[in-house]
């Protein structure tokens, strides 16, 4: 594209849709009446204000249930995926401790799963953390070999938040179902972007967050299957809202927004996913052709349609982000990007230290255009060439010295 067309672009460009998405205008329109006009408490059943709020919550529950292929009463409202993950993992551990104290997950999970596992380990539970291969996928045979009579919960994410890699959820779900083990899925990055079917995938508990698929922040849900023997103890006491699983006054505007976002996603997901995967692939090919020493991190055959994680050898990711001063991207997970620690996801995948520190995540969205990506690719290529000219690691590599022998400020290689 020509320079004049590039100049016409509206800047800055947002390519961090894995961190959060803008609220869809249709979602905002659905939410607005419940802030002031219809402000009732959904638990107030003695007057019209409460009835109206309760009806809106019921409709939203149906919308989310339709997206996941479950029953509306199996949707439990929460503040978001972190709370949902904690409720699922800690609640099942507490409710089933008499049956066993072994839990299983995998190494590239979000910290909202790994940290609850770590806490439970300190409380006497035994954890198995499965490794992943270079694509970021678990080995199903290794999972089967790791199960034991005391295994009460398996928690495997559907899509990775840094690379977009999809796990073999359907296989894992069937394995757990055949053995009577409860199966939890953190589907935060996947819901609204790829099809999710809790029936076909044999999922017992599933976490989601509205702001990842064009809904509001601060509102999400936990799917809890109605099945005999499933005992989930609540994190919060008081009021016994949400089938007794989650006490507290419901966030009616947020719930309405999540429901509307789910309805839109169900209707428009196929065309959006197809368009974004094509844009992403073209963006990657442009960079791979124009810039040497670029690596795509993740599973190229099984990942989210809107996500790519790229390493630009011998340059620090922070330097690239500074050079992309009018482009919003991420050096990793939004929840851990303030940390100087290297990505635990890329480390688990066996990515070399220099490539971990040069990794950038690009998250495309509904508003992303080919013109925007052309602009970003051109600016990125120019920045990479300039930064490598100043990079001592690049100079070392050109002289035949292995840059992996150099320590970064955080002590890693």
Image (cartoon, rainbow, N blue to C red):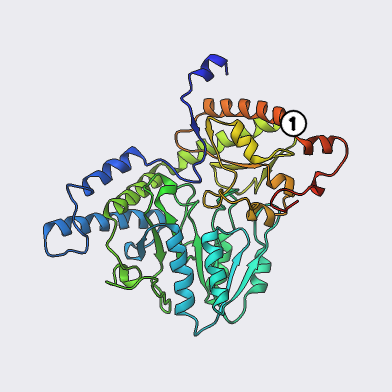
**302 w.r.t. 91: above or below:** above
Residue occupied by mark 1: 390
Q: Position of residue 198 (x, y in %)?
A: 45, 61
State the quadrant of the N terminus: top right
Q: Position of residue 136 (x, y in %)?
A: 65, 54
Say which residue appears at 40% left-offset and 71% top-offset: 235
- In the image, residue 372 sits, relative to residue 340, either above or below, namely above
Q: Secondary structure at mark 1?
A: loop
Number of numbered discs overlaid on the protein picture: 1
Rendered location of residue 367, percent (x, y): 45, 33
The answer to whether residue 154 of the structure is visible from this angle is: no
- Residue at the bottom extreme of this rendering: 98
Say which quarter of the image contains residue 291: top right
Which is nearer the eye, 359 or 48?
Answer: 359
**Horizontally, is 19 left or right of 346 in the view?**
left
* Residue at the far left in the pictured view: 47
**Residue 123: x percent and y percent?**
54, 78
> Which residue lies most toward the right here?
400
Depth check, front residue: 262 or 338: 338
Q: Residue at x 63, y 61 (%)?
A: 107
User: Is there any visible trace of residue 80 in the rendered image?
Assistant: yes
The local crowd at label 1, few if under 14, some if 14 to 19, many if 20 or more residues have their Cα within 10 Å, is few
Closer-to-camera residue (26/353)? 353
Q: Residue at x 33, y 51 (%)?
A: 259
Left or right for 159, reference 310: left
Quarter of the figure with residue 101: bottom right
């Amino acid at each position: 594209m020509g320079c004049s067309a590039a100049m016409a672009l509206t800047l800055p460009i947002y390519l961090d849709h894995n961190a959060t998405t803008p609220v869809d205008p249709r979602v905002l329109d659905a939410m607005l009446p419940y802030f002031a006009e219809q402000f009732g408490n959904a638990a107030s059943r003695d007057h019209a204000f409460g009835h109206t709020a309760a009806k809106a919550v019921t409709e939203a529950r149906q919308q989310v249930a339709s997206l996941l292929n479950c029953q509306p009463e199996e949707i439990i409202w929460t503040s978001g995926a972190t709370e949902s993950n904690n409720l699922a993992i800690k609640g099942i551990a507490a409710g089933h401790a008499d049956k066993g104290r072994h839990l299983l997950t995998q190494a590239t999970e979000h910290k909202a799963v790994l940290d609850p596992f770590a806490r439970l380990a300190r409380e006497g539970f035994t954890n198995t953390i499965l490794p992943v291969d270079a694509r970021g996928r678990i080995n199903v045979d290794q999972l089967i070999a790791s199960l034991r009579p005391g295994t009460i919960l398996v928690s495997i994410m559907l899509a990775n938040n840094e690379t977009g890699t999809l796990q073999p959820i359907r296989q894992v779900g069937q394995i757990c179902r055949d053995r009577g083990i409860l199966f939890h899925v953190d589907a935060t990055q996947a819901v609204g972007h790829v099809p999710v079917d809790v029936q076909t995938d044999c999922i017992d508990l599933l976490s989601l967050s509205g702001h990842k698929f064009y809904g509001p922040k601060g509102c999400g849900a936990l799917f809890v299957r109605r099945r005999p023997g499933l005992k989930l103890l609540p994190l919060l006491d008081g009021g016994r809202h949400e089938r007794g699983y989650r006490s507290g006054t419901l966030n009616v505007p947020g719930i309405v927004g999540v429901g509307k976002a789910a309805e839109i996603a169900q209707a428009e997901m196929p065309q959006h996913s197809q368009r974004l995967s094509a844009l992403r692939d073209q963006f990657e090919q442009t960079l791979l052709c124009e810039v040497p020493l670029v690596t795509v991190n993740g599973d190229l055959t099984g990942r989210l349609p809107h996500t790519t994680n790229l390493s630009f050898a011998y340059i620090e990711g922070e330097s690239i982000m500074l050079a992309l001063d009018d482009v919003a991207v991420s050096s990793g997970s939004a929840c851990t990007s303030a940390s100087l620690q290297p990505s635990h996801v890329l480390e688990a995948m066996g990515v070399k230290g220099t490539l971990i520190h040069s990794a950038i995540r690009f998250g495309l969205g509904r508003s992303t255009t080919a013109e925007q990506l052309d602009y970003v690719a051109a600016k990125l290529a120019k920045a990479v060439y300039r930064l490598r000219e100043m990079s001592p690691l690049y100079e070392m590599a050109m002289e035949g010295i292995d840059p992996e022998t150099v320590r970064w400020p955080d002590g890693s290689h």
